[in-house]
Amino acid sequence: MPKFTAYDGTELAYHLVGTGKPLICLPGGPAWASAYLGDLGGLDAHRQLVLLDQRGTGDSAVPEEVSSYRCDRLVDDVEALREHLGLAAVDLLAHSASGNLATLYAAAHPHRVGSLVLVAPGTRAVGLPVTEDDWRGAVALREGESWYPEGRAAFEEIWGGRDFRDLRSAIEPFMYGRWDGAARAHAAAADSQIRQGNREAAAVFYQDGVFDPAVTTRALAAVEAPVLVLAGEYDGGPTPALASRLAALFPHGETAVLPGAGHFPWVDAPGDFARTVAAFLEPGVQSVRTASGIRLAHRAWGEVGAPPVVLVHGRGGSGADWTQVAEGLAATHRVHALDLRGHGLSDWPGSYSFEGFRDDLRGFIDALGLAGADVVAHSMGGAAALLLAQEAPGLVGRLVLEEPPPLLPLDPPRGFVARPDEELSFDWPVVPDVNVQLNAPDPAWRKGMAELAVPVLLVAGGGSSHIDQDRIAEMADLIPDARLVTFDIGHSVHAVLPDEFLAALREFGI
């Protein structure tokens, strides 16, 4: 594994997992080696994880000075790693106790931070203590679990003054959202690391005088980088409420709470964790949580305040599919392209329907205040946009439907489709769930076309498309204010002929 030399000559090791832009990852504990972080729930598919073994842990050397284990002095190790990697600024992720370290680093080197992700972070550095009441509230959330009575009794002993390390096995289930096989295996590995860990370092990490919350809090005002504080719903240290208070100390801080997760959210909800963090780290991508609780990733182009356009992708795609069209529209519009649920960097809840995609689109428009926006939608996204225009016409200005499903029963119906072996950028259950509805769509959806109260442009792909072109023509006849334009190019007109597609939008008034 690669190594570098810290300011005092101590040789420190780090491990590289994945490819892409580096993300320095600081393990918690304190004084745990980085092994328990693993691949952070698959985050390595999006970034190269630089997993630091802090001094005296894992493959890093033991320093000569015990005082160098202090959290405030470890800041210099992080800076030395940045210099070693040759980075002008670092993207930094820190878990648990190292949330304090990353906070101190940001306060000391605000211009060296590109972005900061604090996962279930410690909050002592800014004077926000985790209280007994915080833990009592978190413990109470698990009352229905079979292991709850033993764990609650152990917590009562800890609250009474007993060392938590004496009762760790009893309280471990509270650290996870589900005490299943994955959690038990992770906890067993963590226990082994604790037994082999550097207790001397752990004792010094929080030494008296390490933190000056008032000074640190003032210094955080200079941190211009975006900051994500990610908490688990069931965690007691920090609770989601305390995580929000920490995020509020940063000028550009935000909070994400992973439902059903505890102190190790990448173990409880690996996919949700990786997509949430990847969306935050991806340049140009933002996230919004709808009223239904679904987190939707989205991209934007053009001037804020310009007339809005919302772009909706098809099955298996993402908002990034619209980049060429979005760049063309951005000269005169504020363009928004979202990832629907189960796609790209948005939440993957596991079950899907046209109604769910419709609700995503409605929640997205509501959350961003885009009522009256023109909507351009492809294929499956077109069905979602059509249903939204039927249900809430006031939310949609002009509507463009590119190669939409005609919402008539398929003949022959689609049967079983095997999942491909390769890694997918969307959740495979989207396919069978949507096929069920394509085979037998709600007749009311077709009937609603005759009552549609918004102007519609239907874009057809001609004879090389798998969509029945006669059915699209019937849709144009059925919708009161509709026009039809055909490009004999196949199902993805906007991708193959972006300039011609844009010209059709402009002629339509977009």
Image (cartoon, helix red, strand yellow):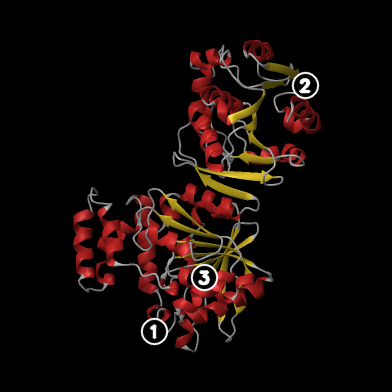
**What residue sits 65% from the left and 74% below the top?**
84
| Residue placed under numbered mark 1 in the picture | 208
**382 shown above or below 340:** above
Amino acid carrying mark 2 in the image: Phe
**Where does the C terminus fall, quadrant-wise?**
top right
Please tell me which of labels 3 and 1 falls first in the chain.
3
Where does the N terminus fall, quadrant-wise? bottom right
In the picture provided, is 363 more to the left or to the right than 304? left
Give, as a three-letter code, the residue at label 3.
Ala
Q: Mark 2 points at which residue?
A: 487
Q: Which residue is drawn at 61% across and 65% down?
A: 224
Q: In which quarter of the image is residue 422?
A: top right
How far from the left and from the top, in percent, is residue 437? 50, 21
Q: How many marks?
A: 3
Q: Residue 102, which numbered label?
A: 3
Dot 1: element: loop
Q: Residues within 10 Å of mark 1 (few under 14, many from 20)?
A: few
Vertical arrangement, residue 438 with respect to residue 153, above or below:
above
Task: Tell whether label 1 touches label 2 (CB within 8 Å).
Answer: no
75 above or below 469?
below
| Residue sitting at the far bottom | 65
Q: Position of residue 443 (x, y in %)?
A: 50, 13
Q: Can residue 54 be seen in this view?
A: no
Q: What element carries label 2?
A: loop
Of pointers 2 and 1, the one earlier in the residue sequence: 1
User: In this view of the protein, can residue 88 be seen by the observer?
Assistant: yes
